[in-house]
Image: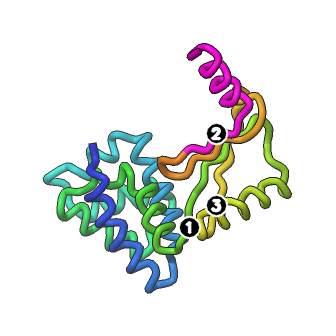
């Protein structure tokens, strides 16, 4: 298992370099694609950790699976991680990078679950209400789950705001059976 604290140090340094170069979004996109490939291709993870394989071959393998030339920032990051035998960081690189970037840019991501898709107006009102409550910019990540019946469940970090019909029914049942 990858230590997220280790990944965070690498991704924080990568974000700083990317910000100076003006490529924070592009680097994030490449890291997310690379993370997905590493998750689905255990052979690549093993290749990156192979002790006798040349650095150039490992970097070429990454270029091949990305389908494009890595940004110079990503190239430098990969070289550093591979030289220090930290290829396992790629298993979480995309998501940890996004966390670091969001934190630096003052963005909070809210996982919003509804029974039906939110229309644009409702999504906007929800985003505005959450932004006012948290006093920061909020990005909604929507998920559909018919099992909540109606209403909305919002998850922000370890906080859960359950305004779903299913949640209300469960709380009502619990209070009625507790007496």
Q: Secondary structure at mark 1?
A: strand
Q: Is residue 35 above or below residue 24?
A: above
Residue with the mark numbered 2? 162
Front: mark 3 or 2: 2
Image point (78%, 33%), residue name: 150
Per the model, the C-alpha gap separating discs 1 and 2 is 22 Å
Residue with the mark numbered 3? 139
Packing grade of label 1 (10 A; few <14, some 14-19, many >=20) is some
Q: Quadrant of residue 95?
A: bottom left
Tell me, yes or no, whether the highlighted magenta stretch contains residue 167: yes
Q: From this viewpoint, which residue is outermost toward the left?
A: 52
Q: Quadrant of residue 73?
A: bottom left
Q: Horizontal placement of 118 versus 95: left or right?
A: right
Coloring applied to the structure: rainbow
Q: Quadrant of residue 132?
A: bottom right
Image point (53%, 72%), residue name: 106
* Disc nearer the start of the sequence (3/1): 1
Q: Quarter holding the C terminus?
A: top right
* Disc nearer the start of the sequence (3/2): 3
Residue with the mark numbered 1? 107
Front: mark 1 or 2: 2
Q: Horizontal placement of 54 versus 11: left or right?
A: left
Q: Quarter holding the N terminus?
A: top left
Image point (39%, 57%), residue name: 93
Which stretch did the figure color magenta? 160-179
Please state the horizontal and vertical placement of residue 75, each as a whole percent of the image: 36, 71
Per the model, the C-alpha gap separating discs 3 and 2 is 18 Å
Per the model, the C-alpha gap separating discs 3 and 1 is 7 Å
Packing grade of label 3 (10 A; few <14, some 14-19, many >=20) is some
Give yes or no for contact between labels 3 and 1 (Cβ–Cβ under 8 Å).
yes
Observer-nearest of 173 and 12: 173
Q: Secondary structure at mark 2?
A: strand
């Amino acid at each position: 298992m990858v230590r997220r604290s280790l990944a965070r140090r690498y991704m924080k340094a990568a974000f700083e370099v990317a910000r100076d170069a003006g490529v924070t979004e592009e680097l994030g996109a490449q890291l997310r694609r690379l993370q997905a490939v590493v998750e689905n291709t255990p052979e690549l993870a093993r290749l990156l950790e192979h002790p006798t394989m040349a650095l150039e071959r490992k970097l070429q393998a990454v270029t091949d699976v990305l389908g494009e030339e890595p940004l110079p920032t990503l190239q430098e990051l990969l070289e550093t991680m591979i030289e220090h035998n930290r290829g396992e960081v790629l298993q979480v690189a995309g998501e940890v990078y996004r966390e670091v970037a969001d934190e630096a840019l003052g963005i909070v991501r809210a996982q919003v679950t509804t029974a039906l898709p939110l229309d644009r107006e409702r999504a906007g009102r929800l985003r505005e209400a959450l932004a006012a409550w948290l006093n920061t910019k909020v990005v909604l990540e929507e998920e559909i789950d018919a099992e909540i019946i109606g209403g909305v469940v919002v998850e922000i970090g370890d906080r859960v705001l359950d305004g779903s019909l299913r949640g209300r029914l469960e709380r009502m049942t619990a209070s009625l059976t507790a007496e």
